[in-house]
Amino acid sequence: MFGQCIDNVRKNAPLVHNITNYVTVNDVANMLLASGGSPIMSDEPDDVVDITSICGGLNINIGTLNKRSIEAMYLAGARANELGHAVLLDPVGAGASKLRTDTATGLMEKVKFDVIRGNISEIKALALGSETTRGVDADVADAVTDEWLDSAAEFAKSLAQKTGSIIAITGAIDLVADNITCYVIRNGRPEMGRITGTGCQLSALITAFIVANPDSRLEAAAAAVSAMGLAGEIGWEHMKPEDGNSTYRNRIIDAMFHMTGEVLDEGARFEIK
């Protein structure tokens, strides 16, 4: 069922505007290209309205904030909403500083996001709207595990209901939920966490998938998460003893480049709650 989603990305070649962090911008562009999408990067306030206008989706990542890029995020988000474009928020480091948390929650107040993607700590920080994640929703642990799976899934659904956004919580076990349905996805490798940028790449990937699959955005977001994890699995299989995390990064991108709908359908590991 996920295979059609990636096939649609390759068929439609969605153009995605990325306001993303400069640590990973090149990898984000290459992951989009590998999936069949097309990237544009711009965070200049005088440029972003025009750039967003010609794209189908907008990926906002707050990983390396500055005053100029924050202004650009609001401008691009407003324009994308006006045009009905798909918009994603990646609240990198929300809960770690007041600026990051306030920026993420402020954007959520002003911009309608189709998807919000982060790790459990970041998502819990957004749910509270505070600069600390301690004590946020006591029924949800700081990692999504089988022990806490039911409560985490309900947390994701409730936040989706509150925000009107698809909530994607990524980690060892990934959750992708709207207010009714939660996909529990078990693709991926723990070694992916030793590469800077896999989360940033995933956010861009999700944006491309929801642009290319406008009538099934929840399934498309889940498909993107599964595809990224599967690329990590395939890339790891091709690692040699002398290879390290830099090579692994490239092998993940290569695995996405070669991924077909059939490969994704065969390799996707998920359940629905």
Image (cartoon, grey):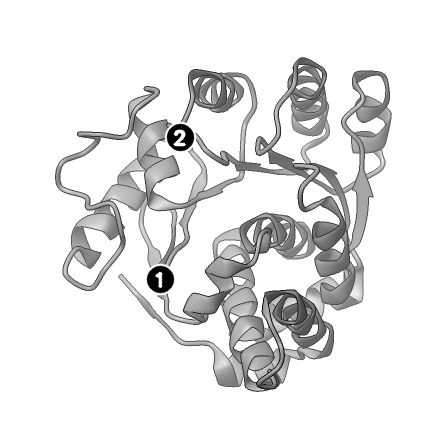
Quadrant housing residue 272: bottom left
Residue located farthest toward the front when viewing the structure as drawn: 242
- Picture residue at 38% right of the left edge, 46% below the top: 178
Horizontal side, residue 43 vs residue 89: left or right: right
Residue type marked 2 = Thr
- Picture residue at 67% right of the left edge, 42% below the top: 23
Report the Cα–Cα distance between label 1 and label 2: 24 Å
Residue 267: x and y, percent? Answer: 49, 82
- Picture residue at 80% right of the left edge, 59% below the top: 13
Residue 140: x and y, percent? Answer: 19, 43
Residue 183: x and y, percent? Answer: 36, 61
Quadrant housing residue 254: bottom right
Label 1's element? Answer: loop
Label 2's element? Answer: helix
Residue marked by disc 2? 163
- Picture residue at 45% right of the left edge, 37% below the top: 165
Q: In which quarter of the image is the C terminus?
A: bottom left
Task: Say which of 267 and 65 sits in front.
Answer: 65
Q: Earlier along the polypeptide chain: callout 1 or callout 2?
A: 2
Q: Are marks 1 and 2 in contact (CB under 8 Å)?
A: no
Which is more foreground, mark 1 or mark 2? Answer: 1
Residue type marked 1 = Ala
Q: Residues within 10 Å of mark 2 (few under 14, many from 20)?
A: many
Residue 90: x and y, percent? Answer: 53, 38
Q: Which numbered marker is on residue 172?
A: 1
Against 195, is 122 above or below? above
Q: Which numbered marker is on residue 98?
A: none
Against 61, is 67 above or below? above
Task: Say which of 88 and 45 sits in front.
Answer: 45
